[in-house]
Amino acid sequence: MEVLRLECRIKNLLERADFGAEVVLHGWVRTRRDSKGGFSFIELNDGSSLLGIQVVADGELANYKSELTQIGTGCSIRVHGKLQESPGKGQTVEVHASRIEVLGWVEDPDTYPLQKKRHSMEFLRQVAHLRPRSNTFGAVARVRNCLAIATHRFFQEKEFLYLHTPIITSSDCEGAGALFRVSAESPAQSGDSASEFFGRAAYLTVSGQLAAENYACSLTNVYTFGPAFRAENSNTSRHLAEFWMIEPEMAFCDLDGTINLAEEYIKYIFGAVLAECPEDMAFFNQWIEKQAIATLEQVVNSDFERLTYTEAVEILERSGESFEFPVQWGNDLQSEHERFLSEKHVQRPVVVTDYPRGLKAFYMRQNDDGKTVAAMDVLVPRIGEIIGGAQREERSDILRERMSEAGLPEQEYWWYLDLRKYGTVPHAGFGLGFERTIQFATGMANIRDVIPFPRTPGSMEF
């Protein structure tokens, strides 16, 4: 079989103007139209672009009548031909085929799931192995890729070290207890196999943060980009059991430093999407969220508002809005509160800081008032919280107090306490939920539609 030539990906062909050039391309048939003149128009897509390319198949091709008039949506083909200027509207180039090989037939065209142009999101989740062939999910995949590459580019340009933190862990980073237990089962084992294998209980991580702090306290600036897991029985449009997190950790850094980095990072990756995925963003803007592009442009070009939690509560109390959840100092901000602040009050991203200590994790640095901690959340329109971060508690005595309040045994976190014992430093970091970020960029309503294979309560296909 001939090796795929990268220069002949359809995205690249659509940008070329060297008409007459010999090309070889591969892809899946979207549509085929037969002309009365004895030739066919085949729309071919290989996933590199939202747009497909038109292939003109002449009736004189050797397998035209035997095969090419039988191919339909979903069939895979290889096309040899010449690049030509297209006379049709909405396209600049097309390929005039000199040879077309059918690589894979759709065995039963009547049962091919993607026959129609438009399908419900719920239906497409049931065929997650094929949904990337649809316009929506192909575009989601390309935007996801762009955001991931831009993330690495951003941190590498700032000389952060990319760190791989454990997926299997013995610690609960957040202290929330919503953990998946890991077991090593085999026919020869029985009982508590998790404890037998590691000598103690093991879980899937909810965050790489604590491990990243170890390396930040030796290498200064590090970041993680990996999967995380929460065993929350939640079926909302904003929650997954398996998701991806981006978590930078910086030594010699305070709360203001991590807020500045978070704002710069968000503007960078959204700027990259606008610049590098214009066709896909135009698609989302037309079919998914009418303000998708304008919203990203606003984020990139505006300064983030900064409010303390106390100021935010006062604003919400004075708003006159009828919230489902009551607003009171000491209560956590709900999604409706976060969206009001970002969508209606300032109409741009908001950073809320200095939350009550009882609302936040044990590792967040206690402020001098004894009531609040140096925490921050970045809130954006439509989504609410997109980033959560904090300055970490570097003082050993106060950290021990917070751990005791949270019911966390010191012996389980001895290594974490050692960081405060041997050359402690001010340090800070944040975590960004990657799927919520993709939701915000694309306007997709459900988080299950921005990850290739969603894991949710009662659902784990593929």
Image (spheres, rainbow, N blue to C red):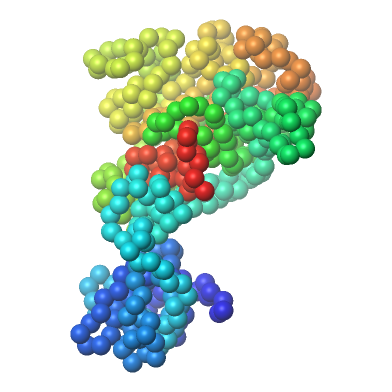
Q: Residue 98's x, y, as percent? A: 40, 88
Q: Nearer the viewer, residue 343 or 138?
A: 138
Q: Residue 361's x, y, as percent? A: 57, 19
Q: Which quadrant would residue 63 be assigned to in this image?
A: bottom left
Residue occupying image coordinates x 46% and y 72%: 104
- Total marks placed: 0
Q: Is residue 254 above or below residue 109?
A: above
Tell me the quarter of the image containing the N terminus.
bottom right
Q: Is residue 10 above or below residue 404?
A: below
Residue occupying image coordinates x 58% and y 40%: 227
> Does residue 423 appear anywhere in the picture?
no
Q: Nearer the viewer, residue 248 or 136?
A: 136
Residue occupying image coordinates x 40% and y 19%: 333
> Does residue 343 appear anywhere in the picture?
yes
Q: Which quadrant would residue 437 be assigned to in this image?
A: top left
Q: Residue 157's x, y, as percent? A: 58, 48
Q: Nearer the viewer, residue 239 or 377?
A: 239
Residue occupying image coordinates x 55% and y 50%: 153
Q: Please indicate whether residue 106 sits to the left or right of residue 316 in the image.
A: right
Q: Is residue 311 above or below residue 287?
A: above
Residue furthest left as drawn: 36
Q: Please indicate whether residue 409 sits to the left or right of residue 118 in the image.
A: right
